[in-house]
Image (tube, rainbow, N blue to C red):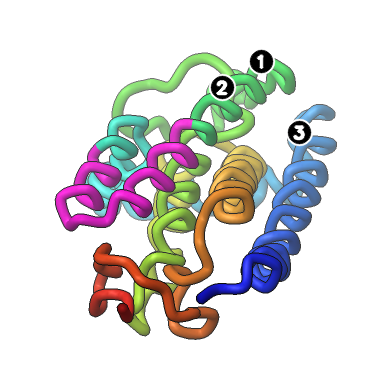
Amino acid sequence: MNDPRRAAERRFRLEAPLIVAAIAVFAFTTAPALDGVPSPERWVFVSINGLAGWLEAPIHVVMTLGLMIAVPIAAGIAFLLRHPRAGTAIGVAGISAYLIAKVGKDVVARGRPLTVFADGDVIARGAVQSGLGFPSGHAAVSTAIVCAVIPFLRTPWRWALLIVPVLVSFGRIYVGAHLPLDVVGGAAIGLFCASLYHLVISRPAVRGADVEEPQATSEPALGGPRDAA
């Protein structure tokens, strides 16, 4: 039998630092975003946005993982694999991240590169992005999905999934849709939503072998054997 107090303590030790870090990162990116575009941020943007054109096709494919539609698709896959807890985590964290990012755009009211840079020093790839930029919804959604599902995986390569939001964020800068602080702020929102969900709802028995406790369940772990009966 699991000790509820011990389970709660483990969840707190795992998730509380991530939640605090996410809030801190979002705060530290919001402050300069409110004041315009710092010189270092502009340099990073120009460096990434000006990379070779052959990257455009694969980048556009990767960026679909940050679309809102990716949330129900990823959650649906988890349900098809008979892991409703993972599917629920993906759905709740992903939708929450998307909505918070939408609110954040209105609060910060920072434009996208094409409107921020008056000198036109932006290479727009694909459809021209309009509206507000900070924080990036793509970065928020992709980070939320990945951070929501990682604790349910039992495979040693699960942490490699973190490359997904990194590539999505990179892509948003490359196509000229977002500035660097936009994607960092968005990623912080995604991490916050996933970590808060796991802190409040997720069970330690499915958080991976390093914190697993025996628990009677018929629900299989993603990428691993069934939980011990």
> Percent x, y for residue 167?
41, 56
Q: Which residue is mark 1?
A: 106
Within the image, what quadrant is residue 221 found in? bottom left
Percent coordinates x, y for residue 30 in the rendering: 77, 36
Magenta range is 73-95
Question: Mark 1: few, some, or many residues within 10 Å (few <14, many ≥20)?
Answer: some
Mark 2 lies on residue: 102
Q: Nearer the viewer, residue 208 or 4?
A: 4
Do tag 1 and tag 3 residues touch (Cβ < 8 Å)? no
Task: Name the kind of residue labelled 1 in the image.
Answer: Asp
- Residue 31 covered by magenta stretch: no
Q: Specify whether residue 86 is painted magenta.
A: yes
Main secondary structure along the magenta-highlighted residues: helix
Mark 2 surroundings within 10 Å by alpha-carbon count, few (fewer than 14), some (14 through 19), many (20 or more): some
Helix, strand or loop for disc 3: helix
Nearer to us of marks 1 and 3 is: 1
Say whether marks 2 and 3 touch (CB < 8 Å): no
Q: Earlier in the sequence, mark 1 or mark 3?
A: 3
In the image, taking residue 111 as reference, residue 164 lies left or right, namely left
Query: CA separation, marks 1 and 3?
Result: 13 Å
